[in-house]
């Protein structure tokens, strides 16, 4: 699903039948195009890290016949979170790992990654079979294989079973939604990037109609499709981030809107968003059920973007390639939305005791001399974002950095992103894109 419906004007793969399914002629056509699309994928540059993406040959019951790959950063603490990532059609685990920016965020914030990988024996274009009920039902087919991977990773690496998340692109995004519905007790949150609402398709042919132009249903009907997968489950439901480009001709943007309608209904929400904001990369965010920190559902819309995962190499967030589009760091914003941006999302220990005593005496004397000199307006400083925050030129919120005063976004809060800021008036710093 990382390419268009077959056409001479758009690249193709999405669903194709697997495991003895019919429509062999369509399968052959899609397979031919998939080879061409796969050749376009840019090989990711090697990363400077001792941790590597590693195949796990045995991880438990595997009725979906999937492969498992894992990335566990060095020195990962006990009870760290886990993120499951599902590639799109004509992709594989290595391509998604190398381009999407998740590896960098796993290193920075301390969480493990698991990549299920589809096999051509199951689907000729390597799409996850999100449109086959036998692969999306709880404890059946590919869904059960992914659950086995989660259980294996949590047990093997001492991860936090209450902080498991799933995200994916296109066919992977559609499957991520299906997994959230099948296992709301397993996943705390999800990310659906250029995906399809849960329960939209029940066959490969049906899947194409879901992709474009999409299907029209009420919010209640979409919500019922999620609830039908677990009739006895009443919550809590995962927090869901939905990403879509406004110029996506492969999976129509109406699918993103339908996904938001679906998950807000599941969470018992109605009406418009509770908060909105404008992000970088011509991206708007709408939050339902709270603000960016507390909302149950977030809708990220990237103006002018086509079909793919939004990345931002300038901020150290992934690399551009086929279906990895240089626009905005969707990975970073999703990490923040899930609450993993600071130390893997562990809020730490809240203080329980008040201070033992309050100060009772005022200062013995007031300072009489002003500071010897004020910083001169117009000074430009180039530093990494960690240095800017340490020096008081910037602040960090949810793992990202903003200039003091202007609140100009400077990118991820770390020592790898270097930016320039200018003090245009005392205590008021602005981003200087061209450098000092």
Image: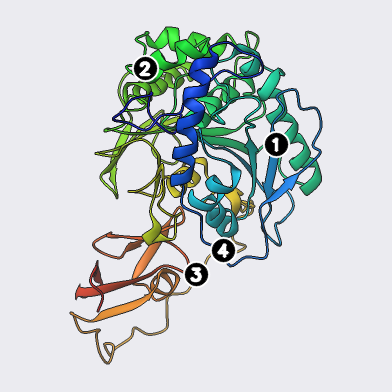
Distance, label 1 to label 4, CA atoms, is 23 Å
Q: Earlier in the sequence, mark 4 or mark 3?
A: 4
Residue 266, image x, y percentages: 49, 17
Is 64 positioned to the left or the right of 210 in the image? right
Residue occupied by mark 2: 270
Residue occupied by mark 3: 360
User: Is disc 4 surrounded by few (<14), some (14 to 19) or many (20+) residues within 10 Å?
Assistant: few
Image point (62%, 24%), residue name: 184
Q: Where is residue 36, by image quadrant?
A: top left
Distance, label 4 to label 2, CA atoms, is 44 Å
Task: Indicate the colouring scheme.
Answer: rainbow
Q: Does dot 3 land on a helix, a strand or a loop?
A: loop
Residue occupied by mark 4: 47
Task: Report the disc number at residue 67.
Answer: 1
Image point (73%, 35%), residue name: 149
Residue 298, image x, y percentages: 40, 33
Distance, label 4 to label 3, CA atoms, is 55 Å
Is 279 positioned to the left or the right of 23 in the image? left
Which one is nearer the viewer's eye here, 225 or 357? Answer: 225
Q: Are marks 3 and 1 in contact (CB under 8 Å)?
A: no
Q: Where is residue 166, by image quadrant?
A: top right
Q: Does dot 1 land on a helix, a strand or a loop?
A: strand
50 shown above or below 349: below
Image point (38%, 23%), residue name: 5
Distance, label 3 to label 1, CA atoms, is 65 Å
User: Which one is closest to the eye, mark 1 or mark 2?
Assistant: 1
């Amino acid at each position: 699903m990382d390419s268009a419906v077959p056409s001479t004007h758009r690249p193709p793969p999405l669903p194709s039948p697997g495991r003895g399914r019919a429509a062999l002629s369509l399968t052959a056509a899609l397979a031919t195009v998939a080879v061409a699309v796969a050749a376009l994928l840019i090989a990711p540059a090697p990363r400077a890290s001792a941790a590597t993406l590693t195949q796990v040959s045995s991880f438990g019951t595997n009725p979906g016949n999937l492969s498992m790959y894992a990335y566990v950063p060095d020195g990962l603490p006990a009870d760290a979170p886990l993120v499951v990532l599902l590639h799109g059609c004509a992709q594989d685990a290595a391509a998604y790992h190398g381009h999407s920016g998740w590896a960098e965020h796993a290193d920075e914030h301390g969480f493990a990654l698991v990549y299920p990988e589809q096999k051509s024996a199951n689907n000729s274009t390597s799409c996850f079979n999100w449109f086959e009920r036998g692969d999306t039902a709880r404890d059946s087919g590919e869904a059960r294989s992914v659950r086995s991977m989660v259980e294996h990773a949590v047990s093997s690496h001492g991860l936090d079973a209450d902080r498991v998340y799933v995200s994916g692109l296109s066919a992977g995004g559609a499957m991520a939604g299906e997994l959230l519905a099948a296992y709301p007790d397993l996943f705390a949150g999800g990310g659906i990037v250029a995906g399809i609402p849960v329960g939209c398709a029940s066959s490969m042919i049906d899947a194409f109609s879901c992709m474009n132009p999409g299907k029209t249903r009420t919010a209640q009907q979409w919500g019922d499709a999620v609830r039908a997968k677990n009739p006895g489950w009443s919550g809590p439901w995962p927090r869901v981030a939905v990403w879509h480009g406004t110029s996506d001709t492969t999976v129509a943007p109406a699918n993103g809107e339908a996904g938001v309608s679906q998950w807000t209904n599941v969470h018992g929400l109605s009406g418009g968003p509770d908060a909105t904001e404008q992000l970088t990369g011509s991206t708007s965010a709408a939050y339902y059920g709270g603000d960016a920190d507390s909302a149950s559902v977030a809708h990220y819309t990237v103006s002018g973007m086509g079909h793919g995962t939004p990345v931002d190499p300038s901020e150290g967030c992934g690399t551009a390639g086929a279906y990895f589009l240089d626009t905005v760091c969707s990975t970073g914003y999703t990490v923040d939305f899930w609450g993993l941006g600071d130390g893997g999302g562990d809020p730490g220990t809240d203080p329980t005791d008040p201070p033992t005593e309050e100060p009772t005496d005022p200062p013995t004397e007031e300072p009489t001399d002003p500071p010897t000199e004020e910083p001169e307006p117009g000074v430009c400083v180039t530093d990494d974002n960690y240095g800017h925050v340490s020096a008081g030129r910037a602040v960090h919120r949810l793992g990202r950095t903003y200039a003091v005063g202007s609140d100009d976004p400077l990118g991820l809060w770390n020592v790898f992103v270097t930016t320039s800021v200018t003090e245009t008036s005392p205590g008021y710093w602005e981003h200087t894109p061209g450098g000092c």
